[in-house]
Amino acid sequence: MIKRIWLGMALAIAVFGQTVAPPAVPNLDRPALEVYFRHLLMWPASVEVTLANPTPSPMPGYYQMKVKGSLGPSSQEVLFYVSADSQTVIRGEILDVKKNPFQAEIDLLKTDNQPFLGTPGGAVTIVEFADFQCPYCKVEAGVVRNQLMAAFPNDLQLFYMDYPLASIHPFARGAAVLGRCIYSQNNSSFWSFHDWIFEHQSEITPENLKDKVLDFAKGDKNLDLGKVSACAVAPEPRAEVDRSMAIGDSLHLDSTPTFFINGRRLVGSIALENLKMVVEHEIAYAKSAKKAAADCCSVQLAIPGMTPPSAAGPGMAAPTAKTGDSK
């Protein structure tokens, strides 16, 4: 399981104006590029490498190319920018400084109708993709659900997204479906289920999953046991799990847990202090961005008969007028 935090950017290039494409479709040296990419990414001969057709990029003279490595059911996709003569390769992201650097991820994170905790409209939104059979998710669930949320009681909102890795966790998808059934009746009951299933993770098998979850549901006065049982075989919760997984796939997830904190991707088991550092950074950024927006859109006007700001005495201030966004 990957244990790392992406707190930096490999590359940030501010590009202004419209996308500019090279003048013609390049005749890239694909064999040479494949050899180069295999060496760079440490992909052995057993990994099948696919170089997608190049498409125009925002950088003049370069094309963007997706390079995919596949080994059985597993795959990894990396985006490169390749010069038309195949002699220069740039790996990273092209960013517009006028936009949030994580806007592409934020646009893909559809959190409607997902289990929710925290303060609506809080400065920091955490979206967690997890698997109820994943041992790392179990550890991280306690850190995020309890310690991190308690550390920032007024600033965080947390959304849970299903991403069961069924190929290695045989009861994970079934647990996700039952979780959706419980959530459809009561959001608070879902979080009780969330805590319960991680606590009893080692006791659950594909064969006893439903019975154990129904036993859990018996103790929750907010749940109708008959509805939970009927929902377990209905198509609707499966469609919801599929939708959550499709969102994860669009974000190229390859492990759980994966978090997006205001769009910033964090993967694997992350210490509480590191999570708090990221949250504090996002809170500070939100305040500074709000102040900058306010400063940019307010100007002092000299109005006949009014004391100018520089000469205003105690308790006096010149009037202000709002203008449009400055460029």
Image (tube, rainbow, N blue to C red):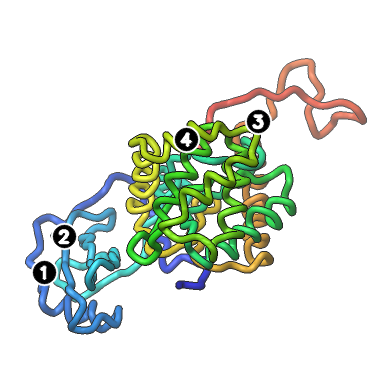
Q: Residue at x 18, y 55 (%)?
A: 55
Instruction: Of the two numbered discs 2 and 1 on the same chain, state the one appearing first in sequence.
Output: 1
x then y, percent, for residue 190: 57, 42
Residue in the foreground of this view, choosing between 1 and 18: 1
Comparing labels 2 and 4, the label whose residue is closer to the camera: 4
Amino acid carrying label 2: it is: Pro
Specify the label residue 112 is tagged with.
Answer: 4
The foreground one among 269 and 31 is 269
The answer for how far apart the CA atoms under marks 4 and 1 are is 43 Å
Q: Are marks 4 and 1 in contact (CB under 8 Å)?
A: no
Q: Nearer the viewer, residue 324 or 287?
A: 287
As drawn, the label of residue 28 is 1
Q: Nearer the viewer, mark 4 or mark 3?
A: 4
Mark 1 and mark 2 in contact (Cβ < 8 Å)?
A: yes
Mark drawn on residue 54: 2
Residue 70 placement (x, y as % from top left): 22, 70
- The residue carrying pointer 1 sits among few (fewer than 14), some (14 to 19) or many (20 or more) residues within 10 Å by Cα, namely some
Q: Residue furthest left?
A: 27
**Distance Cα–Cα, label 3 vs label 2:** 47 Å
229 left or right of 57 in image = right
Query: Which disc, if any, is residue 299?
Result: 3
Identity, as a three-letter code, of the amino acid under mark 3: Val
